[in-house]
Amino acid sequence: MKEQLIRYARAGYAGLFLCTPEEARAEAVVKAAADELQRPLHAWSVTEGFVDTASGSVRACPDPVAALEQIDDLEGDAVVLLRDFGVHFEDNDPVLMRKLRDTLRLAKSTGKLLVLLGIWKPLPPELEREITRVDLDLPGPEVFGLVLDTILESAELDDLPPGIREATLNAAGGLTTIEAENAFALSVIESGTIQPAIVAREKAHTLKNGGLLEVIETTESLDSIGGLEALKHWLLQRCEAFTERARDYGLPVPKGMLVLGVPGTGKSLTAKATASVFGVPLLKLDAGKLFGSLVGQSEANLRAVIQTAEAISPCVLWIDEIEKGFAGMGSSGGSTDGGTSARVFGTLLNWLQDKTKPVFVVATANDVSKLPPELLRKGRWDELWVVDLPNTQERTAIWDIVIEKFGREKTAYDTVVLARASELHTGAEIEAAFVEALHRAFTEDREPTELDLGEVLAGSVPLATTMSESIERLRHWSEGRARHATGNDRPRRGRRKLDQT
């Protein structure tokens, strides 16, 4: 970032908006850039006024317009840091807008650089092409290492073993320096040392409090999925795709996969198992939470998600029910929400296409008809998968998994017979049927029998019956467009049509 600021200054840029919540780290970067440029650094804030950082002299100046006037009076090619200046754009003050444009024009002719610092605020139309946005990336292991050393020194603790240190720095990925410092300090208070598990736990709390991303702790594996053999085999082929050996071999970083299918057929379970296969953290994004009420907030939310995911990488980013996030998109690529969905969607597409960081995106969707065609292009994803209703063999495997999940021996039941009795049932419905049988047996203080399961299945109406038309549309769409997760078992072959059941 320091080198980038230097290049902007030497190129004659007059206005930058340095976007970050880490004010102290950003100021240190700006000061380092000013020192290398051999330019004086001045700073302004509403509370402190105008400060010459070299001499320490302070001039009280709470008014932003008056602060701009003092910038005009500065001699030479100075760097001026304006803290929280973007907040004043919300007032739509025409005098401030006019004065800032005048100051930027004068700064360009005199070699000054104005750096607005703070959380991103949408620029007024008059300033959109005069101020360049620059995002300060979240800190990496090198910065976290300095913070960790400071905590260890202040707590009078010995250096951590190399393996523990590396795990701790990786666990802090995605945090700001202040958040990492707090997590390290809390670990010392709770355990007397630095424990990666505590740092990872605090990171999970921090991301969840942010409301956009959530760290999912999962014990699911491919063994937790009944069927979907082609999809599982495809994932196993990529289990080392994020390693240095893969980079040395020349393999590109995997992009991700889009999983379409009937609700309850294991799409979410697949996302959780993917993180286990790769051995990386799982981040969950609810696409509907991206959209905020303020102008520019939705785009800023997506940029924050991308920045955090890339800082934590390698990781799996799970976008659940992605079609709900872009409900405002029209069939022609327009939108019904003033263009917000279109802008967010465009940002997401560009990132999916161009990302280089090891973030494997797993997007799940129930209704393909609501997905914009641009999202379905193969170049955005490594593969498009469709998950249909489980066949007899898959239902048998699902029954085995469900029975053992609830502490029973699968040999106590004829799962082949149960698979035939549960035709058209999804994995979620099979699990729900077993839970219902457990409740019945529990009230009579006995174990559930196959008769109990048969009665539950006979009395239930599978989702496939009520969604038969939607499932047939999905099968028709997937022919030639997506791979079937089961493998050679094609969606429309060897299976009774739903409207005939």
Image (spheres, grey):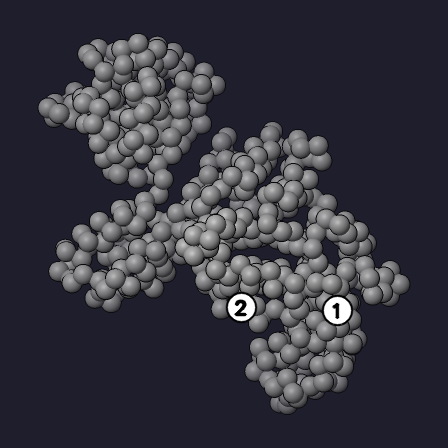
Q: Find residue 383 and report its horizontal and vertical position in percent.
A: 62, 51
* Outermost residue to the front: 249
CA–CA distance in space, label 2 to label 1: 21 Å
| Residue situated in front as seen by the camera: 397 or 487 | 487
User: Which residue is identified by label 1?
Assistant: 391
Position of 171 relative to 85 (above/below): below
Position of 445 relative to 301 (above/below): below
What secondary structure is marked by label 1?
Answer: loop
The type of residue carrying mark 2 is: Ser
* Outermost residue to the right: 500
In what quadrant of the picture does the N terminus appear?
top left
Query: Does label 2 or label 1 sit earlier along the sequence?
Result: 2
Q: Find residue 432 and report its horizontal and vertical position in percent.
A: 66, 71
Q: Find residue 334 and report its horizontal and vertical position in percent.
A: 66, 31
The residue shown at (70%, 52%) is 482
| Residue situated in front as seen by the camera: 29 or 67 | 29
User: Which residue is identified by label 2?
Assistant: 221
Position of 386 relative to 390 (above/below): above
Residue 202 shows which numbered tag? none
361 sits left or right of 475 in the view: left
